[in-house]
């Protein structure tokens, strides 16, 4: 009897210890809501930019283009959705209204809408058609509604706010479940404004009443994420190039929402859980432009974007411009589908699945280290209180090759890891396998890429964390090689250089416009190309017989054809060498012979975080003003700007900067050239 009591006592003591041991670590604040966790698990979804801009070759319509120009004849929303589903996208967000104010749905708030276009004799409703297609194909649906409205006569005044909230009301009421609502940050400036044709500025934090917008959205769509505005639950990542910082915290301090670096990286001490969304277009522009048909991002570029967004703890919102036919162009679909195949193949065989796991600290068996390879998101390896660090290793029966490691933290308890690094062991020898000295954050997901290594043991040192470790998943892969398309540039002396980042591979090129293959000209050294023309090139690996996508470089007339007093740096093919011109200080180019002039290219500074890009400009041929306009969206998306117009014969060209993105005295110019026919 006595013995039994003793055993019961021992069991009771053991199980109470177990309770303590089984206690989950305390949350490290702030933590995400369940909705934010569910959103983060989507990882990739699509943006669709479509509207009046599409039919007028514009990025930022002024608000005066006639509604009658919106005229898709073969529109097929199901084609969009089927394509996007095939690319692994989990949802679609549509630009229901862009800055030009044109509404793609049957709205009572304005005449500037699809109801006054020839599409379906004014009876069409793009929001309905796309949401129906999403339902049919099982994709989530979201909406972008630009707060800035360059058409509305009341913009900037009280009345517009009522109109805007009525639009939110219509869109949240009539089109089924929404998973995300997007408020663009571009606000105020010049516009048509019902004919006033003036500049209006507003205080975006106060003017739009985002609190009311949030209430309307969440009342009907409690799971929806809100992008932008003052009540955001997810944040802009601070650029439109497709990357989140390698250090990327889900937390920020909302009062620093205008600080680019803060948006890129978040903050360890951020007070609010507002994770990053990376928005980037598959083409240079957000809307379709025929002239960008050769600039669809390559599979290698898209793959890199994936690793620097989803692989950096952010979600990827990849934009697909719809063409004039009302379709996702064939090349864009092909690239996106091939890209998805690359991603699926990169993560096909998890090398850690059957590895032997060892660790230096474990918070009881419920939080055992093996949880990181059990394929269950809800179980995790946790360390004891006070152990804000830890080491885990994976041993293999025989040496394995790897070049990717995926790590995930159990974010319902907060984002913790601040610093970690990795080593490999082969035949008793240790070596570092980090691309950098140490790696910083993990969050929902971190994917580390490195050159292929062979090892029989992988060890990960978590050096510093904001609390005990809570790691729910670790995987490793050996992704197949992916060739990156080469870079083509021509300097001031007309020397063309083609460079590839794949050292072992060959480069082939053409100068006659045809697509290169392994039978084209082999590039072995730089060459002279002193005329106008197109150079195309690929990288080719003779062993695997794989080739990259094609790089296309359009080169305009070189220096032999003109005289100019502007610095060579503008014409040297180097997008990082800059010239700064005062406002009104022109670039003047005088051709030796009369030319058929049909446009120009301006490349702003391509360095990270560059500023002072030209916004408003004037372009003259032989002192006649040919174009007075502005580069829409150049601040957020400072890509090469190509402007084309009806040919005009002339000898002297004058390009005059009139304003820049930063209200600075002078404007930055990396490259400039004149397009001739
Ligand atoms: C930007 C806008 O100005 C662009 O036109 C585009 O819609 C992009 C997604 O957001 O801020």
Image (spheres, helix red, strand yellow):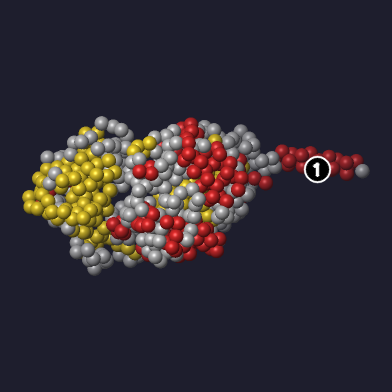
Query: In terms of depth relative to the viewer, which is nearer, 428 or 537?
Result: 537
Residue farthest to the bottom?
A: 519
Q: Residues within 10 Å of mark 1 (few under 14, many from 20)?
A: few
Query: In terms of depth relative to the viewer, which is nearer, 91 or 516?
Result: 91
Q: Position of residue 651 (x, y in %)?
A: 10, 49
Q: Residue 201 is drawn in which quadrant?
A: top left
Q: Is residue 91 left or right of residue 155?
A: right
Query: In terms of depth relative to the viewer, which is nearer, 498 or 579?
Result: 579
Question: Is 373 drawn above or below residue 630 in the view shown?
Answer: below
Q: Position of residue 342 (x, y in %)?
A: 43, 60
Q: Position of residue 220 (x, y in %)?
A: 60, 48
Query: In terms of depth relative to the viewer, which is nearer, 456 or 297?
Result: 297
Q: Residue at x 35, y 51 (%)?
A: 65
Label 1 C-beta lies within 8 Å of the nearest ligand 1 atom? no
Q: Residue at x 23, y 61 (%)?
A: 509
Disc 1 is placed on an element classified as helix
Q: For residue 133, say whether it is visible.
A: yes
Q: Is residue 416 left or right of residue 308?
A: right
Question: Is 261 drawn above or below residue 110 in the view shown?
Answer: above
Q: Is residue 161 left or right of residue 58?
A: right
**Quarter of the N terminus within the rendering:** top right
Q: Residue at x 32, y 34 (%)?
A: 662
Q: Residue at x 48, y 36 (%)?
A: 158
Q: For residue 527, say whether it is visible.
A: no
Question: Is 252 drawn above or below residue 335 in the view shown?
Answer: above
Can you identify the residue that label 1 sits on? 11
Q: Position of residue 242 (x, y in %)?
A: 40, 48
**Quarter of the C terminus within the rendering:** bottom left
């Amino acid at each position: 009897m006595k013995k039994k009591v003793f055993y019961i006592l021992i069991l009771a003591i053991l199980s109470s210890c177990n309770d303590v041991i089984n206690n989950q670590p305390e949350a490290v604040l702030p933590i995400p809501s369940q909705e934010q966790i569910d959103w983060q698990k989507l990882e990739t979804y699509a943006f669709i930019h479509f509207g009046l801009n599409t039919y007028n070759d514009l990025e930022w319509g002024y608000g005066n283009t006639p509604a009658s120009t919106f005229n898709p004849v073969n529109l097929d929303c199901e084609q969009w959705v089927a394509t996007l589903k095939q690319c692994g996208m989990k949802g679609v967000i549509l630009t229901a209204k862009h800055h030009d104010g044109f509404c793609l749905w049957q709205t009572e708030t304005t005449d500037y809408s699809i109801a006054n276009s020839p599409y379906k004799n004014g009876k069409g409703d793009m929001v309905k058609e796309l949401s129906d297609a999403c339902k049919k194909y099982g994709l989530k649906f979201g909406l972008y509604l630009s707060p800035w409205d360059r058409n509305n006569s009341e913009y900037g005044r009280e009345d517009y706010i009522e109109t805007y909230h009525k639009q939110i009301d219509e869109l949240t009421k009539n089109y089924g479940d929404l998973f995300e609502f997007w408020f663009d940050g571009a606000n105020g400036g010049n516009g048509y404004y019902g004919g006033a044709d003036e500049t209006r500025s507003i205080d975006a934090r106060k003017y739009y009443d985002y609190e009311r917008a949030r209430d309307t959205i969440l009342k009907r769509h409690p799971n929806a994420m809100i992008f932008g505005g003052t009540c955001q639950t997810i944040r802009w990542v601070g650029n439109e190039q497709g990357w989140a910082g390698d250090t990327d915290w889900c937390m920020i301090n909302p009062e620093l929402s205008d600080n680019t670096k803060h948006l890129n990286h978040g903050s360890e001490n951020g007070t609010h859980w507002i994770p990053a969304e990376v928005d980037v277009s598959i083409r240079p522009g957000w809307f379709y432009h025929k002239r960008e048909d050769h600039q669809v991002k390559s599979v290698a570029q898209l793959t890199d974007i994936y690793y620097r967004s989803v692989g950096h703890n952010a979600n990827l919102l990849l934009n697909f411009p719809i063409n004039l036919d009302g379709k996702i162009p064939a090349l864009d679909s092909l690239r996106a589908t091939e890209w998805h195949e690359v991603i699926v193949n990169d993560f096909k065989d998890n090398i850690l699945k059957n590895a032997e796991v060892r660790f230096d600290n474990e918070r009881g068996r419920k939080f055992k280290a093996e949880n990181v390879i059990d394929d269950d998101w809800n179980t995790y390896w946790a360390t004891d209180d006070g152990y804000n660090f830890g080491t885990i290793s994976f041993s293999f029966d025989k040496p394995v090759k790897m070049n990717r490691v995926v790590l995930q933290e159990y974010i319902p308890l907060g984002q913790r890891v601040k610093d970690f690094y990795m080593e490999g062991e082969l035949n008793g020898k240790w070596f570092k396998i980090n691309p950098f000295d140490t790696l910083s954050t993990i969050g929902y997901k971190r994917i580390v890429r490195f050159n292929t290594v062979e090892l029989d043991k992988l060890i990960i040192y978590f050096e510093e964390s904001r609390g005990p470790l809570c790691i729910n998943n670790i995987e490793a892969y050996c992704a197949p090689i992916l060739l990156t398309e080469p870079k083509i540039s021509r300097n001031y002396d007309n020397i063309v250089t083609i460079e590839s980042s794949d050292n072992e591979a060959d480069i082939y090129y053409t100068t006659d416009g045809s697509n290169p293959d392994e039978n084209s000209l082999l590039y072995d050294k730089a060459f002279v190309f002193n005329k106008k023309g197109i150079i195309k090139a690929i990288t080719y690996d003779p062993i695997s017989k794989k080739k990259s996508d094609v790089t296309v470089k359009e080169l305009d007339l070189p220096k032999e054809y003109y005289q100019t007093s502007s610095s060579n740096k503008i014409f040297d093919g180097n997008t990082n060498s800059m010239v700064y011109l005062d406002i009104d200080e022109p670039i003047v180019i005088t051709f030796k012979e009369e030319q058929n002039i049909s446009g120009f290219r301006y490349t702003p500074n391509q360095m990270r975080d560059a500023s002072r890009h030209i916004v408003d400009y004037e372009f003259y041929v032989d002192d006649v003003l040919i174009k007075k306009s502005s580069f829409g969206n150049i601040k957020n998306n400072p890509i090469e700007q190509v402007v084309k117009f009806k040919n005009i014969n002339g000898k002297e060209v004058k390009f005059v900067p009139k304003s820049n993105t930063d209200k600075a005295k002078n404007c930055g110019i990396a490259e400039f050239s004149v397009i001739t026919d």
